[in-house]
Amino acid sequence: MAAWISSPFAAVARTAIKTLCFLFNVLHLPSRSWSSSRDEINSADASDAVAVSITEDPETGILPFGESLLYRLSHHIPQHRHYLFPRDSDDRPRRCDRYNALMKTFARFGKADEALRLLREMKTPNVICYTTAMDALVRAGRCEEAESVFSEMISLGIAPDSVAYSILVKMYCFHHKRFVSARNIIQLMVDRGCERDVVTYSTVIAGLCRAGKVDDAFSVLNLMLKDNCMLNAHTYTPIIQAYCALGKVDLASELMEKMRSLGCPPDVVSYNVLIHAFCNKGDFAEVERILRESSHNGWEPDSVSYNTYISGLCNMGMTEEALKQLDVMLEKALHPTEVTLNILLGMLCRDSKITEIIFFLARSFELGLDVGAASYNTAMTRLCEIGEFSAVLKLLSDMLKKGIRPDVQTFNIVIMSLCRAGKLHKAKHIFKSKGFTPDIVTCNILLHEFCLAGEFAEFHQLVADLGSGQVSPDAITYNIIVDGLCWDGKFSKAIEFVRSIDLEFKSDHVAHLAFGLVKGGRVGDLLRLLGEMIEKGLLLDVRLFEFMIQAFCKKGSCESIEIYKICLILDKMLRRE
DNA sequence: TTAGGGTTAG
């Protein structure tokens, strides 16, 4: 304890925890905010999401939904979880196009609830608004709701256009992989007088390629040619990608050549797919050639081209070359993105280069990179894995200083690091702090760590608190509880607990219980339990036996008479089958 | 208002 108090880790930990608790209890966590003469955005909520309110221009009464704001929102939503709530007090009708631009932004980032909320606020949404809401739902994988929105639109007498039908086509192709239904929708749209266009067809091709049906994709392509439908790079690129995924990079290159001869040249996305394929093969000479000949072939590499190349080099362990390509990117005035940073961070983490990780995160600001919590989480997770707990806290304090809002995962890593460093009660202090909303992962970490440390009083208290808390336990929680009860020698309680959560004894918890019983020398209890299961006609799972065998081996009693009793049951089961 | 590309944590 004394050694810990005087260690540099302790100093960092004390400062970080003090700062955290102060922020939680008094100030609320800081969030990034922007302001300009036209618009004023204030952080207004310290819950998981950051609520942002937008004030309209006092002179014109116009809400600042201009291009620049949308650009900034669209670039900040994914990293910093900013949510947008237009003012509720305003009862003036807002124009559909303003709503639409916002809904589109939310749709792009999978924020379907926000898009729906805007739809519901509108007095007379048009076909575009309904379509955008459907798109948001489909992107979020909420297909049934998307269909309901479509039905609602029809019931209100709003006729779907070809875009609305195309979104249904996308839903059937991408999510359900029901291509016959997609074809029926296309037929329906034609019957209703809507034209199937290059987007509709390209969507089907992309869906077929994702499902590995490249031949069918070619059939659609031929149909398009027969229909005199103009083809573009969107049409061909999914096929190029499918070829690459099948290892047929030569066929992909040939197809790109054919595109050029047909007057439909590949664009930067098509080339990026090819670069990705050559990177996977480790053929960097070919990547260099593609990049060198780009101007001649009428395209310019973008950040994704270099991110792909850098990632390929990192995966092959070519660190120096990867960093060299970062310089090339900068020379070409291509702005490195957060993805670039994450690729390079991942490489440094794999190599456990602690000083470089911290230096790189610091340098990212000099490069003008907008680093989010995800990047810090990547680095902190690795540092925690290799036992560099004080570095984890250093990065947390760095985040807070820079105004980057830690997310629940950041705290989970911090809590895990504190536990691993033996500071379980400090970790619990953060967990209990007012304002911090733990998730089930946080609970699981603490439960597990208290068990590992043999602090069963704390463990039982946490289990009891779980019942009254807002977080619902998951399968991992139950397994940890079963393990913990067995470690603490509370075998009857463990058996009763498993009975209470799983009457059918079908879950993994039974295997954990079997492990605990064998390890704790309670084979008699286990045999009674197995007997009961067999009597009830329940099938014993293979995993159950795997756990039991592992437990016997760990206990070093593989040759004991008890394991033969278990084997007898296994034999009985095998005969029965 | 709709279609194709790169990364990381859990």
Image (cartoon, rainbow, N blue to C red):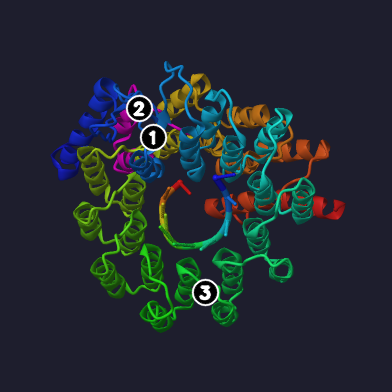
Three-letter residue code for mark 2? Ile
- Where residue A265 is drawn, which disc sits there? 3
Vertical order, A466 against A2 (above or below)? above
Is residue A136 shown to the viewer in this render? yes
Q: Is residue A25 above or below residue A219?
A: above
Secondary structure under tag 2 reads strand
The disc, 3 or 1, on the residue closer to the chain's N-terminal end is 1
Say what amino acid the circle numbered 3 marks: Pro
Compared to A239, does A371 lie above or below? above
Range of the magenta residues? A412-439
- In this view, the residue in front, A573 or A502, is A502
Nearest to N terminus: mark 2 or mark 1: 2
Could you classify mark 1 by the number of other residues whose Cα lies within 10 Å: few (under 14), some (14-19), or many (20 or more)? some
Q: Are marks 3 and 1 on the same chain?
A: yes
Find numbered disc 1 in the image and state the secondary structure of the residue it sits on.
loop
Q: Quadrant of residue A197?
A: bottom right
Measured from the top left, where is residue A243 in percent x and y? 60, 73
Give the label, 3 or 2, closer to the camera: 3
- Quick one: label 3, few (<14), some, or many (20+) residues within 10 Å? some
Q: Nearer the viewer, residue A514 or A394?
A: A394
Question: Where residue A522 appears, x then y in whole percent?
Answer: 61, 39
The residue that mark 1 highlights is: A65
Residue tagged by mark 2?
Answer: A54
Q: CA distance from mark 3 to mark 1?
A: 36 Å
- CB under 8 Å between discs 2 and 1: yes
Find the distance from the CA under tag 3 to the CA under tag 2. 43 Å
